[in-house]
Amino acid sequence: MRDTTLKKWMPFQALTEQGTYLSHVIDYHKRCQKPILSEEQQEEINYILTNYLDSTLIINYYDNYLQTVTGKVSKLDVINRLITINDIKIKLDDITSIVLKSASF
Amino acid sequence: MDKVIFCIDLKSFYASVECVDRNLDPFLVNLAVCDVSRGNGSIILAISPRLKQYGIPSRLRIFELPKIDDIIFAKPRMKRYLEVSSKIVSLYLEYVNIDDLHVYSIDECFLDFTHYMSFYNCSPIELATRIKDEIYSRFHLHVTIGISHNMFLAKVCMDIEAKHNDNQIAFWKEEDIKNKLWKISPLDKMWGIGKGYKQKLNRLGIYNVGDLATYPQEKLKEKFGIKGEELSLLANGIDDSDIRNKYIPNDSSITSGQVFFKDYSKEEILLIIKEMMDDLVLRLYETFSTCKEISLSIGYSKNITGGLNKHQILPFATNDLIYLRDIMLSLAKTYIDDKPIRNISLSLGKLQSSSFIMGNIFYSIEKQTKQRNLLKTISRIRKSYGNNSVLRLSSKLDCSTIYQKHNQIGGHAK
């Protein structure tokens, strides 16, 4: 099997700064509209958020574009409607879906 | 179905940007991008196409320039070039998805148009002309485009043929491998072969790409290993690289290095190491990584020559500033001789994710947390007030280079 990766085309990164400029461009191009959730989807998110106990969650959320984070919830702030996971604060309204990765019980 | 790969290169990028910003035509003006204030030996980053006509090599120093009166010297502005470069990448992304784009360098990109040809509904050359015209109308920059059915042929086609065509576009098909690729001579004109390999291959009686393609692959593999096999495939116009299949190296490192304009003593170099480690560890922290290997390399002054290259593997992965700095300093103290030093490079290797950190009974976790909080604060201050806002006091000494370093990108003026 011959190598099909871009190994031999790895750029010679003399300019580390180029990376930050490129990531801005890529962020800009990934931007999209915030998805609208159906009532069933909202209920499912609500069910998991009330029953997740201590399990690892995969949260898909919207922040300019769709992003994913995997980890354990460190804080769920119902008053400000914020969830903190892996040091990332996510508004509850921005969550598009949640998957239970592993149950701790 | 044959792939359609574009390799797009911005023609003498730095020089053209400088010309355009001065409202000049790069084909009519002699312009060289270099920092004249650094003296006669400073390197020329780029020259305008008009200057290239004098047969000047692409990389040279100021005193090597032929005596031409009306040369404009432009001070490099790396930040501006990066800006323009990212704007152009942004333009490419209007044509293709991010997955089908590969940024090879500041001025070279590969685009995979295979799945877009029916959408644009035109021949590859028409599409290339369209992209070329759009880049010219938006940025007034000239581009060279090589088209073929794999990345290697696209790149070589651009280097060999497109640059000499009137419309700066070339399209290589299957039959061009024999007609054009195999005619390339000397060997080092082909991408992937440098001066060293050219000499080694010449000794085997291989003088052009055709010889290389017809030379038995097993023998090349025996002589040069994997590289030999790869060269044989490339010479036959075979390159299986898939732009969508991004390569993620499993062992990465971050490096910081600099070349000094005067000789540095051992004592001064320890101070420079401290400064550089501050920045390096901050970079490590900001990319959420820890490192497990630390290395130091030093080059002595011209009349002494030589240098040293030392590395140490750490007992555990860490991103602790004081710990890493002390190891680097002890490496430097033990191995560096008391000779004038001209260049230095520090590197942190075997990077891992910092989302978990192994506990260590010899190094308290409280201390590490304290250090991490410090880095967090410094990082935030620097983000809002600039890189020079938080520095160690010793940076005020004359031998410090940190102010200059922060005002540069890639060792050239911002």
Image (spheres, coloured by chain):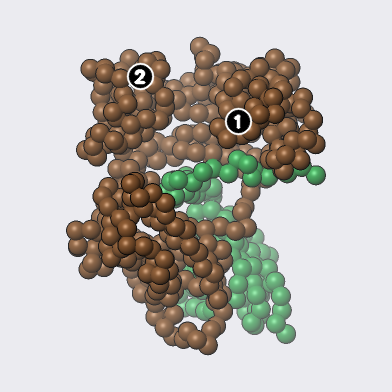
Q: Quadrant of residue B249?
A: bottom right
Task: Have a look at marks 1 and 2 and say if they share a chain.
Answer: yes
Quarter holding the N terminus of chain B? top right
To which residue does mark 2 refer? B51
User: In the rendered structure, which amino acid carries the disc numbered 1?
Assistant: Gln
Q: Position of residue B280 (x, y in %)?
A: 41, 62
- The residue at 43%/46% (across/down) is A15
Q: Nearer the viewer, residue B413 or B124?
A: B413
To which residue does mark 1 refer? B199
Element marked by disc 1: helix
The answer to whether B101 is drawn above or below residue B1 in the figure is below
Is the residue marked by circle 2 packed among few (<14), some (14-19), or many (20+) residues within 10 Å?
A: many
- The residue at 74%/35% (across/down) is B220
Q: Position of residue A100 (x, y in %)?
A: 69, 72
Query: Disc 1 vs disc 2: which is toward the camera?
Result: 1
Q: Which mark is residue B218?
A: none
Q: Note the chain letter of the brown one.
A: B
Q: Position of residue B375 (x, y in %)?
A: 38, 71
Q: Of label 1 and label 2, which has the lower sequence position?
A: 2
Residue B348 lies left or right of residue B264; in this view the side is right
Q: Quadrant of residue B216?
A: top right
The answer to whether B39 is drawn above or below residue A43 in the figure is above
Q: Nearer the viewer, residue A87 or B314?
A: B314
- Whether residue B297 is visible to the viewer of this picture, yes or no, is yes
Element marked by disc 2: helix
Colour in which chain A is drawn: green
User: In the rendered structure, which amino acid carries the disc numbered 2?
Assistant: Leu
- Output the chain of dot 1: B
